[in-house]
Amino acid sequence: MPTKTVKDVMHVGLITCPVHTPIPEVARMMIKHDISAIVVTDESGHLAGLIARTDMIVLYGYQEMWPHLTAEQAMVTKVATIAPNELATKAAQIMTERKYHRLIVTEMNGQGKEKPLGVVSMTDIVRDMSLV
C-alpha cells in the first residue's frame, strides 16, 4: 500500500473568516458549520491566525469586551501548519507529540506567505485508519 500524504487524508473546504470579522460572527460561523476552530485570513486570503473553541471560551469571561473584538484581536498567530505533500504519518506524529488536535494545511506562495488549503485533524487520521 503506498504511503499517504496529508493531501490524501485532509479535510477540504476550510471555513475561514477575514481579520475584521466581529467575534459574535465568528461564534455564529463556528456553530453553523459545527467546527472547533476557524482560520483567520488577511486581505489576500493568506493565513493570519486561528481561533479555537477554547479561545472563545476564554473570551467569554470578558463580558464587556468580547462583543466588540474582531478576529484579529482574538486570534492566535502561531498556527501549527503542514504542507499537503508531507506524509500523513508525519502529521499524526506532530499532533501526538505536541498534543494538537489539528494542523492547518498550507501552501507557501512566492512571497513566503501561507495560503490555507484545508485541515488535517485527529479525526481525519482515525477516519483513514477505518478505511483499510
Image (cartoon, rainbow, N blue to C red):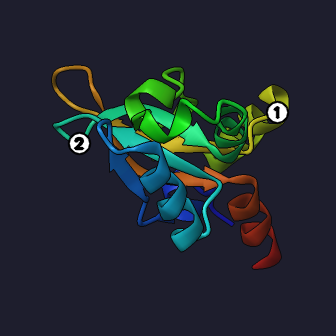
Residue 3 in the image: state x and y as whole percent: 64, 55
As helix, strand or loop, the secondary structure at mark 2 comes to loop
Residue pictured at 53% horizontal, 20% vertical: 78
Residue 76 in the image: state x and y as whole percent: 54, 25
Instruction: Report if residue 5 is visible in the image.
Output: no
Query: Which of disc 2 and disc 1 is earlier in sequence?
Result: 2
Residue pictured at 54% horizontal, 35% vertical: 66
Marks 1 and 2 sit apart, C-alpha to C-alpha, by: 27 Å
Q: Is 76 left, or right, of 116 in this rendering?
A: right
Tell me the crowding category of disc 1: few under 14, some 14 to 19, or many 20 or more residues within 10 angstroms, Cα based.
few
Q: Is 28 left, or right, of 53 in this rendering?
A: left
**Quarter of the rendering containing residue 57:** top right
Residue located beneath label 2 in the image: 45
Residue 101 in the image: state x and y as whole percent: 74, 45
Residue located beneath label 1 in the image: 99
Residue pictured at 25% horizontal, 20% vertical: 112
Q: Nearer the viewer, residue 46 or 125?
A: 46
Q: For the image shown, how many numbered marks are present on the structure? A: 2
Relative to residue 126, is residue 98 depicted above or below?
above
